[in-house]
Amino acid sequence: MKALLDTGIWFRRYHGLPMSQPLRDFLNDEVDEFYICPLSVSEICFKWQRGRLPGIPDPQKWVAHSLQNFVIEMPDSAVAMTAGLWDWDHGDLVDRTLAAIAKEKGLTLIHTDKVLKNFTGFPQKWFRNVTE
């Protein structure tokens, strides 16, 4: 399976932070190719800069290494239009864009977002967040 990881899963996986066992098993056993969108990098840098990721080193020290085994998937104009025009009550533009990338590029979005899991129109696999 070709999987686009959402920001939180990419971040947790790289840093060895807790994840549910079903999610960990799925990533190890079912995914052949990992994809990431650079917006996930922006999202992590934004959170880190505002002190929302205590104990995590400066992203400039680890992000490049964390992306070594990923295919970088950039949003194009078709993705941007899909993300912007979906008739959803989900206001997180990064999540909408990741879902649109999954749809337009034929990737499965792997995520833990309880709101996003209720929407259709894109390939997805939802897992319970370990903190719930």
Image: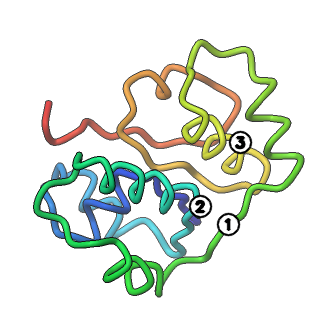
* Contact check, label 3 and label 2, Cβ < 8 Å: no
Q: Nearer the viewer, mark 3 or mark 2?
A: 2
From the viewer's perspective, tell me whether residue 50 is left or right of residue 64: left
Residue 120 image offset from top left, x and y in percent: 63, 25
Residue farthest front in this picture: 50
Q: Amino acid at mark 3?
A: Ala
| Viewer-side residue, 117 vs 50 | 50
Residue at figure coordinates x 37%, y 62% from the top left: 10
Q: Which residue is mark 3?
A: 100
**On-image quarter of the N terminus:** bottom right
* Contact check, label 1 and label 2, Cβ < 8 Å: yes
Q: Residues within 10 Å of mark 1 (few under 14, many from 20)?
A: some
Label whose residue precedes the other's in the sequence (1 or 2) = 2
Q: Which residue is mark 2?
A: 37
Residue 25 image offset from top left, x and y in percent: 25, 62
Label whose residue precedes the other's in the sequence (1 or 3) = 1
Distance between the Cα atoms at labels 3 and 2? 11 Å
Q: Amino acid at mark 1?
A: Glu
Q: Which residue is mark 1?
A: 73
Distance between the Cα atoms at labels 1 and 3? 11 Å
Q: Amino acid at mark 2?
A: Cys
